[in-house]
Amino acid sequence: MIGTTTPAMPTAPGVPAIVSSRFGVADGHTLEGYRSSGSYEGYSALRAVLEMSPSAASEIVKDASLLGRGGAGFPAGIKWGFCPADVWPRYIVVNGDESEPGTYKDRVLMERDPHQLIEGCLIAAYAIGAAQVFLYVRGEMAHAQERIAAALNEAYAAGLVGRNILGTDFSVDIVLHWGAGAYIVGEETALIESLEGNRGMPRLKPPFFPAAKGVYLAPTIVNNVETLSNLPWLFSHSVEEYRSVGTDSSPGTRLIALSGHVENPGIFEVAQGTTTFRELFESELYGNGIRAGHELKMFIPGGASAPWFFPEQVDLPLEGRVVGGAGSMLGSGAVVVMDETTDAVRACLRLVRFFARESCGKCTPCREGTTWEEKILQRILDGHGRPSDLELLLDVADNISPGPYPVASDPANDLDAVPYPPRQTTICPLGPSSVAPITSAIRRFRHEFEDKIVQRDLIPVEGVSVDV
Amino acid sequence: MSEPPRRIEITEPVTITVDGREVTAQNGEWLIDACERNDAYIPRFCYHPRMEPVGMCRMCLVEVDTGRGPALQPSCMLPVTPGMSVDTTNDKVAKAQDGVLEFLLSNHPLDCPVCDKGGECPLQDQTMAYGPGESRFVEEKRHYEKPIPISETVFLDRERCILCDRCTRFASDVAGDPLIHFIDRGSQTEIATFPDEPFASYFSGNTVQICPVGALTAKPYRFRARPWDLEEVESTCTSCSVGCRVTIQSSRNQLVRYQGVDSDPVNWSWLCDKGRFGHEASNSEDRLREPMRRSEDGALRVAQWSDALGAAAAAIRSVDPSRVAVLGGARLTNESQYAWTKLAKSVIGTDHVDAQLGDGLPAEVVLGLPGASIDDVCAKGGTVLYLGPDPKEELPVLYLRLRHAAVSDSVRIVECSPMRSGLSPYAAASLQYAPGELPALVAALCSGDVPDGGVAGVDADTVRSAAALLDGIDDLSVVVGRANLAETAGVVVDAIDAVRSARPGARYLSALRRGNVRGALEAGMSPGLLPGRTTIATGSATWTEAWGAVPTAAGLDGLGILDAAAEGRLDVLILLGADPLTDAADRSLARRAIAGAGTVISLDSLPSASTLQSDIVLPVAAFGECDGTTTNLEGRVTVLHQKVTPPGTARTDWMIAAELALRLGGDLGVESSQVELWDELVKHSAPHDGLSSAALAAQEDPDGLLLPLDATIELAATTPTNVPPRSADSLRLVVNRTLYDSGSAISHCASSAALVPEASVRLSPADAAAMGLETGTFVTVASSHGSVSVPAVVDPGVPGGAAVVRHNLESVDAGVLVDAADPVCDVRVELR
């Protein structure tokens, strides 16, 4: 079976499959498969890295301008440099707690190519001098956990992980840690709390920037699964080859998880910065068009916490700064497409409810505010909305994220975009994320809300819930 | 909020701008404190000056420019930096505060009229000051079953809870009892205990005090008073010798609540539950209200004060002074102790006076060692040799301070104890020694000279690594006390001698348990001692001049008094709040003493086994019922205040002493108040110089004034105690105290009485296995003096060769096993 392939996931001409080259390989998740298939030879990059100095390896990542793929898009090489000099031990934590609605690219990376991630971990650990790597995988992803566990066992047995890796002085352990199922643990400080055995609640930064004070208050680099999965290809090729894809500010490729009302939803590796949303939706390689007979109403360009985009924004490239300036974010690479059959109020409730249920309960505005937003939206859908509810919703939202909230432009009504990011009265951005669908939906589709609001000021005694 | 910012000394001043004003703050302190100190109070719920901030409630958001433009930041987690500019009142801040309060109130029941917190509630107060005025929340609020008991004394109302993390942080970070935590998430988050595991913490009452809403309430205070009906006065808790500063509150002349006050050198606002709920004993129906005399039919009958005092005076007058003894007095105020010392040693003319029942340390050890304050012991980066009793059981707030020192201030504690204690988990080294062998262990620790076979039952490697921690530490702090009541004080004295010879620079904190035992010794309530740290040899001239007469020879100590009474050599035994029948380590000696003494006169506030056996019972005013001063274990003198009137015709101890003096033809020289007694002591006592009643009254902080730490009493040379070897078929007994015992303070305290543990004998797993015992097996523990039947508990914290029984538990009388004349007590444990 080794080397047997199912139809490979295609990339656009001239775009190399940097992280997805084994997605179509049936045995790509095994050590043998990793070595014998894909766009580079497995663990050959590690061998090369072990021959250079750690700082040279860091420089390569910095030169490549490898952007973090977890959401914030911060350059990984620069992040690595934030570890205070001469403070040991250092740790690497791999954030595999992907759980935003619409986002599922890391799960596939962990299931289909676990060795690629392990090799990425080893390269990063060598570069920053980490004593240990914690691989934190979301609790619900049983298959990914099993694949990683099996791959780790193979790698340990092959002398690729553990003591004296490949016969060198370099030793590092990789520990697989299963999450218990909480979206907030995708936030790096909450993930560290969870890893330490505490309740997954974010820490305030400062003082707890993980690079300075992370796991057990030691310097810790938290990197996303996809970020680290880029390293083996980068080190088996060159910075120039890496930077030849995408744009100067956003080089390389990104995995996009496309879902919703397109003909061909799925995961696609696209060039960063140059690919547009239109190409993503319409190209035969990717979405293959909005589903037949329907038209685009709105889309979420970067996961549930991103403000919505509308047809006017489809020609924007998948480039962090451009999308940020247009009032949203690329976030975790989840693009959700909604056509005209989508009820904006229900979509809004659906998203707000997610944040309300996933709020960790630490900060008052998020804990109480997101639930309040959910209750107001539910009441509107139940037919008990009041005319005053829209202003109330917006003001409750303003108490979670004060000031103008990022939103896309609305040329028809001569309204400008408010650029990303939002401000917050909370520690982490979860609470403010709940505001994204509210401000987006009310600004664009106020009439849909008003249509549902019965013109009376009665409070329900017993609510009748509409299924959404 | 009731917690003021911590008083700090500004050592690194920086200038910051607060609301347009330039003010001085300490570099690195939390912004919330700097603003409050400079008259810009920032509202808050979760922040507590004695706990690490969490930034949870978001009430303290202010607008700060830290270089990236003005942004809302939680001032409780923002350290002050030079040039910082902060706006605490602008529109953005006001809207954020308004918003947070509206959020907090959205699910908070508006049951203020029936809530105990109403009237002193931070949520109520801050809503009035900063809140939106009305709520826009029209949805249904959260509902929970309420209130639910989370312990014997604390109730939780989850609907009122605003999830500020104060109680949970206190439990895990301050008390080290992480028994409550959040469960679930988002708006369904609630505080919970673990299933079937109550919040059984000795410090649970603190969570009630720091709860910013009425979510946590304490059984003794629930629905007892409204805050606006309370009268209050500051005082010092005397239930143990730590001397925690408290506010005592009353309603309709009844004590209803004690709240901790933040005394920086002592209790940091914390209290233990025994102290906090002690007012229940004061309000007990059983309080002694009228004097009693034993009538001819043998029963105690209510008597007039004049009859009772007349009889007492007659009994004393009719015998030789050397046949009169005064036992106890550690519960009294400094003034009453001085009055009683003067009465006994000058008017009556006996030196058989001892505030301790043979279960403490010799007075010259307590007063003769160079002292260390609690702050000295807990100073950052220091090293402590801990030879005292389990502080969590006996001196709970000292435990909190030591725990904080070890966890947060890098203090290394080397603990030597007969079994693992509440302090052990935080000690850098915790050594469990064989009873009686502490001096050898201490000598080995100080010298690093460890025989390969180990010492005192501790293996050589453990001793060596602990010795390494002490190596080269000349300014060692040593905490000394009685960890084992079945072992003679001489063993501890020998251990102290070993430290003194090896570490001349060491300083000592004596961890004696009884409330004002230090004050008693400072007042001379010990044989051979006179007030002001003088002895009959060194203080005669001073005190003869002051009093007219002083004893010429040292009298009997506590054990000597009991011995003499048992042998019929005492005609009058005066018990000052002492209850030898339940409190003496040697129970049979106590029984024989009470039976053998001629006339037993007991001064007490509650009936005890000993008062019921007395011939004359004089009811006295308890804590909160009399003015005066008290001295804590460091030698810190603080002022006690009366808040309510004593029950019935109970009088203060010093009044009784003054009255008896007059009836005996003497005069204590007190006309109207105890202040005269104190000022007389201060006038003649060199260590009390500067501690006049006027100086104490002029104190602005709650910290009182510390007596000199340097000793003025000569330490006499002692003869080493000879401890016989243990025979192979016996175990060596450890008797130690638990916080909730069967003493009168607890047994008359409704909410704490249920917490008194069942008696047991604790055995090491190895000994238990050798005897075929498991936890729950009933065994007989027998010494050559007596035996008891108790269930065994297999406890890995007990070293091999030891058997541990708690002192003074009603279910089993461990005192029958002990003979005070023996240096140690060996027992056999057998299956029943």
Image (cartoon, coloured by chain):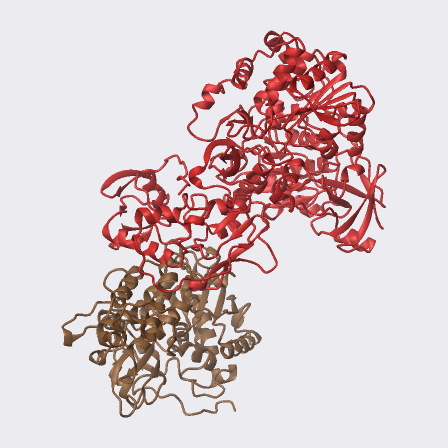
Chain colours: A brown, B red
Query: Residue B501's spot in the image, x, y percent?
Result: 66, 29
Q: Is residue B741 left or right of residue B509?
A: right
How many marks are shown on the rendered structure?
Answer: 0
The residue closer to the viewer here, B74 or A355, is A355
Q: Is residue A114 left or right of residue B493?
A: left
Residue A199 in view, yes or no: yes
Q: Where's the C terminus of chain A, which quadrant?
A: bottom left
Q: Quadrant of residue A95?
A: bottom left
- When the figure is inspected, residue B98 is found, relative to residue A406, above or below; the finding is above
Query: Residue B767's spot in the image, x, y percent?
Result: 79, 51
Query: Residue B646's spot in the image, x, y percent?
Result: 57, 28
- When the figure is inspected, residue A368 is found, relative to residue A232, above or below; the finding is above
- When the figure is inspected, residue A98 is found, relative to residue B718, above or below; the finding is below
Q: Is residue B742 left or right of residue A328?
A: right
- When the figure is inspected, residue A152 is found, relative to residue B565, above or below; the finding is below
The residue closer to the viewer here, A150 or B784, is B784
Residue located 44% across and 66% down the image: A185
Residue A74 in view, yes or no: no
The residue closer to the viewer here, B209 or B779, is B209
Query: Residue B260's spot in the image, x, y percent?
Result: 49, 38
The residue closer to the viewer here, B812 or B599, is B599
Q: Is residue A250 left or right of residue B44?
A: left
